[in-house]
């Protein structure tokens, strides 16, 4: 007799669940599966069931189903790929990488598999970055902290987004029930997993009503006390219909509180699903020239208020989703014309980076502001959580990964204002389908904000030094600086600490004076017989053309590779080259072979032999006597392609760059290309990932995509800025 439930222990005493023992369903061929189904159809249904389980965050269940398919069909691409993704979500990164690699070997043409492989490898690197981040935050935490400060004055203005939905309006009464405010949602939040911090409960300000002037004054006092420069109020305009306008209107008419502010037009649809999309629209947008004119005219009194925030002397106006506006440039032209005609001068228009990821100037805008967690990419932690809500279909992420990505982000060539968030959890709005970031803390938030403040100081001129915070009071998204019962004023104190902490200096530069280094070399040569310097002039060489490039080669016990390496320098299509080789105490006959090769040189050669001092010492010695306007480094077990220097020089001149590097091909000790090797695959993946990031610097921060110093060509003048090697 079978037990009541298929998950109960099997009556046979095996210890297995009944469904996995005598209760296993079988196919027509007698193997486990769905009864009466051909084997291929059974596998297809198991794959669909696995996908549904994965979508519902039942990752372990999905992994078991994928594995059951692979047990019967080891080269099933979809099962390999999706099991790899499941292992990725379980945090089993090595297994995930191996599975996705197997999938790519089966079908190398699927772009999503390659993208997932890059994500897996990035996650492996994040684990190390996360450890380093935690160490630095702990170091910051244990340092002396100033608890009370006088009035905070900073060249960087911190602006917090401000939600006005804390008072009832007729529309919300009609759509959501009488008396609805954001607090209605906030009170309903309950945990979805063990350790889930829900609900978020306000502390000293309570469940306030923004119709109260006293509450607005207390908010401003708190903001000012902890260094918040001002608020960015969301304004809601739907073709002449304004919503939630009362708090800002009363700030304008009363003249209080005396705290700077600006506005952001939240121009997405209002929907019953709280997602701004086109389903279940409660009130929508309809863009037109007439509406653009009406919008900016009703906003003129706001923009002209003496408290209004300006950038470079121009009123700052933000748009939440610029890409939704079909004629954005025409709209911007209308706004600017109206502002000028009414005596406000030029506007400073800023697009919020929610779904907009373009150069704002193409749309008539001046800048963008980030808006985390929009744009965040990482693996879910769902499988690592103890889920307590059986209907939970949401996503759980690591706040530390958000910080790491932000720190590595390189703003584009246009003005970008950085933005941070204290945490994020919109369970109150979407209980079963929420997005939750765990492992946030005031200390980590402080570290992130301080880094953004430092970067802003280095990157932007005084009048444009803004950093945004999402948000002052987004309680329904668990994203608030306002005090709560769990952290008190912790996140506010983090803002103050980030502003008053001294700016960290850049890493010290190793002094490098080529003239002094050359003098030291000659002095050492005169007194140390172990140091040898030989010069070789080319016989009958044609006059060199173009800028002189000094190729510096540090060599140590690489005799088998030297002939190809040095030969690749002589074979360059760019003729203006000098070769400087520093043999760092080789014991395998390298110096003798180098002497032989130098005697047949096609360009001037300087050959130095020194006692072993390490690669940095060898490089610095070669750089000290380089005469070229440019320097190329070649490791002694590498080789250049014939047009390399000519191609990179042309690219540097075209782009106005001072440093360049190229792609690489991986070769073995026999000189043959390496088609498949775990290390080569990892290096190739890092290079391929360049195209996934908004700028090259992002890739360089995550990993050395140049692979080695032997891939660098740079202006020699750069050494006075960076210093030598160490």
Image (cartoon, helix red, strand yellow):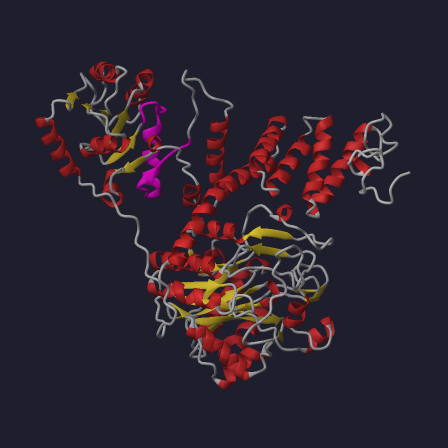
The residue drawn where x is 43% and y is 22% is 667
Q: Position of residue 521 (x, y in %)?
A: 14, 31
Q: Is residue 637 magenta?
A: yes
Question: What residue range appears in magenta?
Answer: 635-663
The residue drawn where x is 34% and y is 56% is 458
Query: Would you identify the image quadrant in which residue 476 lies?
Result: bottom right
In the rendered image, the residue lying farthest to the front is 13
The residue drawn where x is 81% and y is 30% is 32
Q: Position of residue 182 (x, y in %)?
A: 63, 71
Near-viewer residue (515 or 716): 515
Query: Would you identify the image quadrant in which residue 641 lies?
Result: top left
Q: Position of residue 251 (x, y in %)?
A: 51, 81
Is residue 239 shown left or right of residue 468? right
**Vertical side of 530 occupied by 14: above or below:** below
**Vertical side of 300 occupied by 451: above or below:** above
**Vertical side of 224 occupied by 436: above or below:** above
Is residue 284 shown left or right of residue 656? right
Near-viewer residue (699 or 605): 699
Is residue 194 shown left or right of residue 406? right
Q: Quadrant of the C terminus?
A: top left
In the rendered image, the residue lying farthest to the right is 1
Query: Would you identify the image quadrant in which residue 258 lies?
Result: bottom left
Query: Is residue 378 visible in the rendered structure shown here?
Result: yes
Q: Is residue 240 magenta?
A: no
Q: Quadrant of the N terminus?
A: top right
Q: Position of residue 642 (x, y in %)?
A: 35, 23
């Amino acid at each position: 007799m079978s037990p009541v439930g298929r998950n109960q222990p099997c009556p046979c005493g095996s210890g297995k669940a009944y469904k996995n023992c005598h209760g296993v369903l079988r196919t027509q061929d007698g193997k486990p599966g769905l009864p009466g189904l051909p084997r291929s159809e059974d596998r297809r249904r198991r794959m669909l069931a696995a996908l549904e389980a994965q979508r519902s965050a039942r990752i372990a269940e999905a992994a078991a189903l994928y594995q059951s398919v692979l047990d019967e069909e080891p080269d099933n691409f979809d099962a390999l790929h999706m099991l790899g993704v499941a292992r990725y979500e379980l945090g089993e990164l090595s297994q995930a990488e191996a599975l996705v690699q197997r999938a790519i070997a089966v079908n190398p043409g699927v772009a999503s598999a390659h993208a997932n492989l890059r994500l897996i490898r990035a996650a492996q690197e994040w684990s190390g970055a996360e450890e380093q981040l935690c160490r630095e935050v702990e170091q910051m935490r244990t340092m002396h902290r100033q608890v009370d400060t006088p009035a905070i004055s900073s060249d960087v203005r911190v602006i917090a987004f401000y939600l006005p939905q804390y008072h009832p309006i007729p529309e919300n009464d009609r759509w959501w029930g009488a008396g609805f405010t954001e607090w209605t949602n906030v009170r309903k939040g309950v945990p979805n997993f063990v350790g889930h911090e829900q609900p978020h409960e306000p502390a000293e300000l309570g469940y306030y009503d923004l119709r109260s002037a006293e509450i607005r004054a207390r908010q401003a006092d708190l903001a000012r006390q902890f260094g918040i420069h001002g608020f960015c109020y969301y304004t809601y305009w739907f073709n002449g219909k304004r919503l939630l306008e009362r708090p800002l209107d009363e700030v304008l008419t009363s003249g209080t509180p005396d705290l700077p502010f600006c506005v952001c037009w939240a121009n997405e649809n209002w929907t019953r699903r709280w997602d701004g999309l086109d389903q279940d629209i409660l009130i929508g947008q309809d863009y037109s020239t007439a509406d653009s004119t009406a919008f900016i005219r009703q906003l003129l009194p706001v923009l002209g208020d003496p408290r209004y925030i300006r950038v470079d002397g121009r009123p700052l106006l933000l748009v939440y989703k610029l890409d939704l506006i079909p004629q954005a440039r025409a709209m911007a032209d209308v706004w600017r014309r109206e502002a000028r005609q009414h005596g406000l001068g030029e506007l400073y228009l800023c697009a919020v980076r929610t779904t907009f990821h373009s150069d704002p100037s193409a749309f008539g805008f001046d800048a963008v502001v980030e808006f985390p967690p929009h744009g965040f990419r990482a693996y879910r932690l769902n499988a690592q959580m103890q889920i307590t809500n059986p209907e939970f279909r949401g996503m759980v992420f690591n706040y530390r990964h958000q910080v790491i990505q932000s720190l590595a982000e390189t703003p584009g060539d246009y003005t970008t204002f950085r933005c941070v968030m204290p945490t994020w959890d919109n369970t109150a709005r979407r209980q079963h389908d929420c997005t939750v970031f765990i492992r946030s803390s005031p200390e980590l938030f402080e570290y992130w904000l301080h880094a953004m403040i430092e970067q802003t100081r280095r990157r932007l001129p005084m009048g444009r030094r803004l950093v945004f915070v999402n948000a002052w009071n987004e309680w329904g998204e668990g994203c608030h600086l306002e005090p709560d019962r769990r952290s008190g004023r912790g996140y506010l104190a983090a803002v103050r600490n980030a502003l008053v902490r001294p700016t960290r200096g850049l890493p010290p530069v190793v002094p490098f004076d080529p003239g002094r280094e050359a003098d030291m070399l000659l002095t050492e040569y005169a007194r140390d017989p172990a140091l040898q310097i030989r010069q070789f002039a080319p016989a009958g060489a044609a006059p060199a053309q173009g800028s002189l490039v000094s190729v510096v080669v540090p060599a140590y016990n690489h005799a088998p590779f030297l002939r190809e390496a040095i030969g690749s320098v002589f074979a360059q299509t760019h003729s203006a080259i000098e070769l400087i080789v520093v043999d760092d105490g080789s014991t395998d006959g390298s110096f003798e072979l180098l002497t032989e090769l130098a005697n047949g040189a096609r360009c001037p050669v300087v050959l130095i032999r020194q006692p072993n001092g390490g690669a940095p010492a060898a490089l610095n010695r070669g750089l000290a006597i380089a005469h070229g306007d440019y320097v190329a480094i070649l490791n002694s077990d590498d080789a250049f392609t014939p047009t390399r220097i000519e191609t990179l020089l042309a690219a540097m001149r075209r782009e106005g760059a001072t440093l360049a590097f190229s792609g690489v091909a991986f070769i073995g000790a026999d000189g043959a290309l390496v088609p498949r090797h775990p290390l080569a695959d990892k290096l190739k993946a890092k290079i391929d990932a360049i195209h996934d990031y908004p700028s090259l610097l992002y890739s360089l921060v995550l990993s050395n995509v140049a692979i080695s110093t032997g891939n660098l060509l740079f202006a020699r003048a750069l050494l006075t800025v960076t210093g030598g090697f160490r």
